[in-house]
Structure formats: C-alpha cells, structure tokens
C-alpha cells in the first residue's frame, strides 16, 4: 500500500489537501455548520443540568472535534466520482494512498481550526486547562483519527451520491457519540455501557480532555493516547485499502 | 524506441459485457494515432486503461517502456489526458486548476508558473486565469483541460473525443493546436467518432467495434482497401428515371440523391461512357459529373456492417 511512499508523493498529498481546503472547507456555510452542529447538540444535552464549565467543557470540545472532522470528508470521494474529477486525479502520477491521505489532512486541519472556537469560548467562560500539552496533543490526534474515520465512511458502499454516504456516516457518528461518555462521565456509567464505550475512539479523546481540565481520567492517559493512535492508524489503513479495492466499482 | 505505446491482448469486461476484447496495437513515436469507432465500441474504456484509471482484466499496455499495471506512476508521468467530459474543478480558478495539476506531476513552482502562463496565453485563457471555471463556456473548459493535460510537457497526449459538442470555431482551433503539438514531437492518441477529424488529423487509424480492432492502417490505405465503393455522381438538366439508368449500367447500386444520381461501381471509365451515351441518346445535358473514391466513412460503415453480419 505504501510501497510508493516518498517525499515527492507526500508533497502531492499536500496538493490534494490544498485543493480540498479551497473547494470544500473554505466556505462560510461549511465553517458555520461545523460550529452550529456541536453547539446545538451541546445545548440540547447540557442546558438545565446545572453543570459547571469544567464539566461541560470536555463534551463541547469532544463534539466539536468529532463533528467537524467527520463532516465534509465522507462527501468528497462520492462528489468527485460524480463530477469525474476523481478520474482526472487518478490519471496523474499520484499514489492512491497519497490521494486519501490528502483528503484526511484537509479534514484534520478543518477539525483543528473549528476546535479553536469552543476552546476559546470555554477558556473565556472560566474553564481551567491544567495541562495544555495533553489538551493540544489530544485534539490534534483525535482530529486526525476522526478525519480518517470520515474518509473510511465513504469507502463502502462505493457510491457516487454524496447524500447516501452522508446518511451512512450519520448512522455511524450518532451511535458513537452516544456511547462515548460525552454526556455522562465514564465512571458514572454502568459496566455494559463502559464496555461499549471502549470501542469508540471518542471515549478516549473525551477522557483526555477531562484529564486536561479536571485532572481526572477514567483510563491512564497513556492508554487514551495509545488507543487514539491505534484507532487513527486502523482507520487510515482501512480507508486506503477499501478505497483501493472499491475504486474499480466506483469508476465503472 | 519506435513504439511509444504497445498494447497486447488487452481485455476489459463489465459484468456480462466485454468492453475491450483482446486488442493489440502499437502507436509509433510522434504520430497522431486515431481510435475510431461508434458509441460504445470500447474507445473510452481503452483510453481509461492506457491512462491508468481502470485496470484491465487481462493483457498488457506498455507506455514508454513502463507497464501501466506494474509501474503506473512512472507511465503516468509521461502522459497528458483530455477526457470526453471536461473535468476541471469548477470551484477553482483556471490558474488554481493548472497549479494543482502541475503539483500532482511534481513540477517545481517557478517552472509551473512559467508553463501555465505560456499555455493560458497560447490558448487564449490568460485574461480569465483568475475566474472560476464554473463560469466558463464548454469551449473554454475544453481549452483549460488541454492546458492541464499539457502542463507536464507530456510525451503522449490522450484525447478522448475532444471536439464533441464544441462549436465549429473551437473544434477547428483544437484540431490545429493538436496538429501543432504533433509537429513539435508529441505523440497523440485521438479517440473520435468524427470521420472527417480522423481523416484530416491522423497518421494512422485503428477502427474499433464491439471491443475488437476491425482494421489498422493509414486513412488512405484504409480507403484503398475498401471494395466496390467507388462511385460516380451525375446530374442532368432534366429529371431522369433512376430505373432507366440502372438498366443501362451495371452499377452495383444506383441511388437518387436530390437532383443527383449516385452510381456505385468499380468500372468507372465504362460507366461514364455509358452515361454520356445515354445523355446523348435521350437529348439530355450533363450538368455535373464527379467520380468519388470511398470516404473514410464508407470504409467505416463497411467494416462495422461486416462485423454485424459476422456476428449474426
């Protein structure tokens, strides 16, 4: 899969990133949507629960990074299949892995930028960050992990209808959100729920944010980091592999 | 290296349909190679295989010595593609589209700026370089696609029905530009169903039908190979009974085309004599008389029909 890896191919992946940012992300409605979705979910689940800013903060950041990093990515490949621009890209000397890595990186950067807004709001409203390094590193890793998940979600079925892929991605995203301890800290959840939570990368991310702001976490932070890295690698490799395999169906 | 493209036993199936069926051909360095066939004959599928977009089920395609299956990146480094449908990014400007393509070929910044500027000027798009492609006409989009295909200075240019849907002026410009590129040493692989275009542009032509190569030769040789297709077109000063003409000549086919009569025969000299005598005997004046050699279109129809009969 990465046998063609070289700095030259990596540069070509950045060209794809630049293109994606220009076409899909650098648009007012997209940026606003990236902020509004987590904001509404946040208000829907936290208003009236009489929680402190510290308690609210992990959920807000978790949702912002999760939703923004997975919002546009799943739609890119179907959209480009339909407009036949994917064919153009495939006729140039760029490896398949570099194309999808480029898509992941665009989504990653968008997730990072969007996460700044709730981060600033949280800090302004009194959330205390005890470990900035853990917070920033976890946001970066989580954003990459969720972006890879977003590209993976468009791999199968190999549809050229963005709406179909977006529907499939919602079917994955919402259950993941509800099992991940975003709304209720892991320690307060029943055992079966905690077992379920452990299969979601969002769980480990929210746990790391709790550690950064409340100095308490359910898992040791090394486990949280290791889990996010492993999920990210698994999603990225699976996304590239499945896309490679489904490209002929997509293009025929 | 004499052959710049070598194709052997190339086959591609889509379910039950065999789109490309064990085709073999070579394209020589510097030539304009026409790939002629009706809709659905397998032209686009062949181009998509040769440009590394889809993989064949069997056979091989060698581009400048690189197998497109085993070494796709190296093979693609030397090619430029103008697909049937203009597929530039409509939400990017012409300049951004060109820069993206150049970056995907790994062309250094200064070089890509210089090339893009030259190409946009050559094709008359420089003034619109900062406009979004969304607002471009079909002709402008096709010119931009040509710029994108040429930004890497490709040794082989693949053109898939490049003039389809273009107005006369844009189509003529595109053809003359392709001719110019060929003179400068670029090998051109042109897929088309436009006989006139193939006849005027191509050094050699492959005719493909139902996924199989029906013939490969120069346009003139293809016409020469055609049997029984020479014809005489004649018109008289008065209406003439076609049946009477049919009786006095031994033409294989006689047809009325407006005020003209077309006779298909290989005995051109004899038939003209008979027609002149017929005019004299019936007190007619010949208004026009032309002898016609078979056109590429005649050859094409003959080959396609032959295949159909064979299939039946």
Image (cartoon, rainbow, N blue to C red):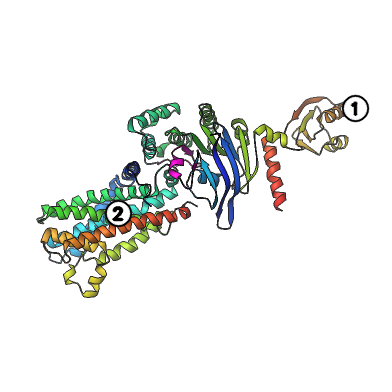
CA gap between label 2 and label 1 equals 89 Å
Front-lying residue, B104 or B36: B104
Classed neighbour count for the residue bearing mark 1: other residues with Cα under 10 Å, few (<14), some (14–19), many (≥20): few
- Residue lying farthest to the bottom in this orientation: A191
Q: What stretch is highlighted in magenta?
A: B66-90
Front-lying residue, B136 or B119: B119
Classed neighbour count for the residue bearing mark 2: other residues with Cα under 10 Å, few (<14), some (14–19), many (≥20): many
Q: Is residue A130 left or right of residue B186?
A: left
Which residue is rendered at x = 40% and y = 50% of the image? A79
Task: Tell which subunit mark 2 falls on.
Answer: A
Residue A86 visible here: yes
Read off the residue under disc 1: B281
Q: Is residue A102 left or right of residue B191?
A: left
Residue B104, above or below B293: below
Residue B30, above or below A225: above
Q: Which mark is residue B235?
A: none
Q: Where is residue B56 in the image (x, y as percent from the top left)?
A: 53, 50
Residue B67 magenta: yes
User: Considering the numbered disc 2 on the image, is that residue within a helix, a strand or a loop?
Assistant: helix
Q: Where is residue A175 in the image (x, y as percent from the top left)?
A: 29, 66
Residue A90 magenta: no
Read off the residue under disc 2: A147
Which residue is rendered at x = 38% and y = 52% of the image? A1
Figure quadrant of residue A162: bottom left
How many tags in the picture? 2
Q: Where is residue B131 in the image (x, y as percent from the top left)?
A: 37, 34
């Amino acid at each position: 899969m990465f046998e063609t890896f070289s700095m030259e191919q990596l540069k070509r992946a950045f060209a794809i990133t630049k293109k994606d940012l220009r076409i899909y992300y650098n648009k007012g409605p997209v940026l606003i949507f990236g902020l509004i979705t987590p904001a509404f979910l946040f208000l829907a689940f936290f208003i009236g629960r009489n929680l402190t800013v510290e308690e609210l903060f992990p959920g807000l950041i978790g949702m912002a990074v999760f939703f923004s990093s997975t919002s546009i990515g799943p739609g890119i490949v179907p959209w480009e299949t339909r407009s036949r621009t994917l064919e153009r890209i495939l006729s140039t000397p760029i490896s398949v892995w570099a194309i999808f890595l480029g898509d992941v990186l665009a989504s990653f950067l968008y997730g990072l930028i969007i996460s700044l807004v709730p981060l600033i709001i949280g800090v302004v409203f009194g959330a205390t960050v005890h470990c900035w390094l853990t917070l920033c590193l976890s946001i970066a890793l989580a954003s990459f992990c969720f972006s890879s998940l977003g590209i993976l979600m468009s791999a199968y079925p190999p549809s050229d209808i963005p709406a179909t892929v977006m529907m499939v991605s919602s079917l994955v995203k919402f259950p993941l959100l509800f099992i991940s301890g975003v709304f209720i800290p892991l320690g307060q959840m029943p055992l079966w729920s905690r077992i379920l939570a452990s299969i979601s990368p969002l769980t480990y991310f929210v746990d790391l944010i709790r550690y950064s702001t409340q100095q308490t976490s359910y898992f040791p932070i090394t486990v949280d980091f290791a889990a996010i890295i492993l999920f990210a690698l698994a999603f990225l490799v699976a996304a590239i592999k499945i896309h490679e395999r489904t490209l002929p169906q997509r293009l025929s | 290296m004499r052959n710049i493209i070598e194709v052997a036993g190339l086959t591609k199936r889509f379910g039950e349909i065999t789109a490309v069926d064990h085709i073999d051909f070579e394209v020589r360095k510097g030539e304009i190679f026409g790939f002629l066939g009706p809709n659905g004959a397998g032209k686009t599928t062949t181009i998509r295989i040769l440009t590394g977009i889809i993989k064949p089920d069997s056979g091989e395609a060698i581009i400048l010595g690189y197998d497109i299956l085993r070494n796709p990146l190296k093979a693609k480094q030397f090619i430029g593609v103008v697909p049937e449908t203009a597929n530039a990014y409509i939400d990017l400007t012409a300049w951004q589209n060109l820069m993206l393509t150049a970056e995907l070929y790994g062309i250094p910044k200064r070089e890509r700026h210089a090339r893009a500027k030259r190409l946009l000027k050559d094709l008359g798009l420089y003034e619109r370089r900062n406009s979004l492609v969304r607002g471009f006409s079909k002709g402008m989009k096709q010119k931009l696609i040509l710029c994108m295909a040429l930004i890497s200075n490709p040794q082989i240019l693949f053109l898939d029905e490049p003039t389809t849907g273009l107005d006369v002026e844009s189509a003529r410009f595109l053809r003359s530009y392709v001719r110019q590129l060929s003179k400068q040493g670029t090998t051109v692989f042109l897929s088309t169903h436009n006989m006139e275009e193939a006849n005027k542009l191509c050094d050699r032509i492959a005719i493909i039908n139902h996924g199989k190569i029906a013939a490969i030769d120069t346009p003139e040789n293809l016409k020469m190979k055609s049997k029984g297709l020479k014809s005489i077109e004649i018109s008289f000063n008065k209406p003439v009974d076609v049946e009477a003409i049919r009786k006095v000549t031994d033409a294989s086919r006689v047809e009325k085309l407006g005020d003209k009569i077309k006779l298909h025969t290989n005995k051109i000299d004899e038939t003209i004599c008979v027609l002149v005598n017929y005019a004299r005997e019936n007190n007619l004046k010949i208004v026009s008389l032309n002898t016609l050699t078979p056109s590429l279109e005649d050859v094409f129809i003959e080959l396609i029909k032959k295949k159909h009969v064979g299939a039946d």
